């Protein structure tokens, strides 16, 4: 009865009310075991570590649930990708199979050194560090990444989503981002910065990159013990594309997850793979990867999304999208303006009082196995952001309207009109005015980051960390 009760209270992130029963039944039927403990992990998607016993011996597996923005077949896609990788000798956790309640697939639990959840809200409070052993493991991982890229594309074509590999340079470069952009457009999540990034990507495809390979999509994620790479993971956005996309992921993830010396990793990859790394192409795919991630962040904010993390979406949108413009600025030699300052806050009495009340009361909420301390912290971060937004919204809107008015040559009455005018001009523009657009959109996102943080740009805060340059 004690175990059943513990399982029951951890069911708040999934649709199926039989989640506890489903986990226990799967462990019994597939592994012949009895569930001892279920722990939901601090991630942006529902995942559970399940400890069980069989004839007195203890084991553990991971139930990996669906992403907040997943399509109906995306979770099974991830499972099938990992099965194909395992069949080709790639070091991924062994996949035990599918379970319907909760909707998840089950893999071996890998005991590993502490690994950050990979979320910005945790990195801000506890910045990620890089030990000497983890750095050596990072260097060792580059061989594993090269091995992933060497798995023939034909090994994945039985998976429906990968059955028709791209063949042209445009399709190789853009397939993943175009799909996410179209999803964002249908959801009404595309704003002028995201619109500009997509049109820039279309205009700057590296036409000489015509070799399609299997890529992890969100590379750099693996478990280690000491210097040993134990298992590669997180293939939910794997696709067929350009290997340089995966190399760009290291820049995109750093410093939220400390990736160490990025150029040194690229040199290591070139050495173990025998393939030259084109840093300008890596720069292009940095924009590509960050654009996809920035659009995805807005989906995390959907209140109905199972396992969604609203405040993480805000943080990632602000930082990730801004860094995409920093990647363009490096490629095109554009000087950006970081000398911005918050004005005196404008106090909105009702919002100020109400949000401060929410902050105080949320901090007093009792936690339990059903409502972990980290969940309370995430909930409390929402009114903190909204309080800042109420205080600085007028400043943000007036500055953004002024920037867009200057670009369009029109007097625009409000932010909605300014955004509509910006979207229209971006769709019609060519590269001639890139410098002005990049600077204006970067200022917009930097101001938004300042509202999120409630401070002027601060190099010590990972939210403001500038993209590390890779070009000489």
Image (cartoon, rainbow, N blue to C red):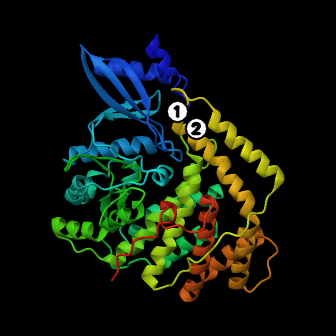
Is disc 1 surrounded by few (<14), some (14 to 19) or many (20+) residues within 10 Å?
some
Left or right: where does residue 360 sit relative to residue 286? Answer: right
| Looking at the image, residue 79 lies above or below residue 288 | above
Q: Is residue 368 left or right of residue 104?
A: right
Q: What residue does disc 2 label? A: 376
- The x, y position of residue 359, in whole percent, is 68, 43
Rendered residue at 71%/68% (across/down):
396
Q: Please, is residue 188 above or below residue 64 in the view?
A: below
Name the residue located 46 percent from the left edge and 13 percent from the top edge: 2
Q: Quadrant of the C terminus?
A: bottom left
Distance from disc 2 to disc 1, alpha carbons, whole Å, reads 7 Å
Q: Nearer the viewer, residue 262 or 125?
A: 125
Residue 190: numbered disc? none
Residue 166 seen from this side: no
Q: Is the residue marked by circle 2 packed among few (<14), some (14-19), or many (20+) residues within 10 Å?
A: some
- In the image, 307 versus 471, the foreground residue is 471
Callout 2–callout 1 Cβ contact below 8 Å? yes
Q: Which residue is mark 1?
A: 372
Instruction: Provide residue 196's location: percent of width, then percent of height.
Output: 58, 74
């Amino acid at each position: 009865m004690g175990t059943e009760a513990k399982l029951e209270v951890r069911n708040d992130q999934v649709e199926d009310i039989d989640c506890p029963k489903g986990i226990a039944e799967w462990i019994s039927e597939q592994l012949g075991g009895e569930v001892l403990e279920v722990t939901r992990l601090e991630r942006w998607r529902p995942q559970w570590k399940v400890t069980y016993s069989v004839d007195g011996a203890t084991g553990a597996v991971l139930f990996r649930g669906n992403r907040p923005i997943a399509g109906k077949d995306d979770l099974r896609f991830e499972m099938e990708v990992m099965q194909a990788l395992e069949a080709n000798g790639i070091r991924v956790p062994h996949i035990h199979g599918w379970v319907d309640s909760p909707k998840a697939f089950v893999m071996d639990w890998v005991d590993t050194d502490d690994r950050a959840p990979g979320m910005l809200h945790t990195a801000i409070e506890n910045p990620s560090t890089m030990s000497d052993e983890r750095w050596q493991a990072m260097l060792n991982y580059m061989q594993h990444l090269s091995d992933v890229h060497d798995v023939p594309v034909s090994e994945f074509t039985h998976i429906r989503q990968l059955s028709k590999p791209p063949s042209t340079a445009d399709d190789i470069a853009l397939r993943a981002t175009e799909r996410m952009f179209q999803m964002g457009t249908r959801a009404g999540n595309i704003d002028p910065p995201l619109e500009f990034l997509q049109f820039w990507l279309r205009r700057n495809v590296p036409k000489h990159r015509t070799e399609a390979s299997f890529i992890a999509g969100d590379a750099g994620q693996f478990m280690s013990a000491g210097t040993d790479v134990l298992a590669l993971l997180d293939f939910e956005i794997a696709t067929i594309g350009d290997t340089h996309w995966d190399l760009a992921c290291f820049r995109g993830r750093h410093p939220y997850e400390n990736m160490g010396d990025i150029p040194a990793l690229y040199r290591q990859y070139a050495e173990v793979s025998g393939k030259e790394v084109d840093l300008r192409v890596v720069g292009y795919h940095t924009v590509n990867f960050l654009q996809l991630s920035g659009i995805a962040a807005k989906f995390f904010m959907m209140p109905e999304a199972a396992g969604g993390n609203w405040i993480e979406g805000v943080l990632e949108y602000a930082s990730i999208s801004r860094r995409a413009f920093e990647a363009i600025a490096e490629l095109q030699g554009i000087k950006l303006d970081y000398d911005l300052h918050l004005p005196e806050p404008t106090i909105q009495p009702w919002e100020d009082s109400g949000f401060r009340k929410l902050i105080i009361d949320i901090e007093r909420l009792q936690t339990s196995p059903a409502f972990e301390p980290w969940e309370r912290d995430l909930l409390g971060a929402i009114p903190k952001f909204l309080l800042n937004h109420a205080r600085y919204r007028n400043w943000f809107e007036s500055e953004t309207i002024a920037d867009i008015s200057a670009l369009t040559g029109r007097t625009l009455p409000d932010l909605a009109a300014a955004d509509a005018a910006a979207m229209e001009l971006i769709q019609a523009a060519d590269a001639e005015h890139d410098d002005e657009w990049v600077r204006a959109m970067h200022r917009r996102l930097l101001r938004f980051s300042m509202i999120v943080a409630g401070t002027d740009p601060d190099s010590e805060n990972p939210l403001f960390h500038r993209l590390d340059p890779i070009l000489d």
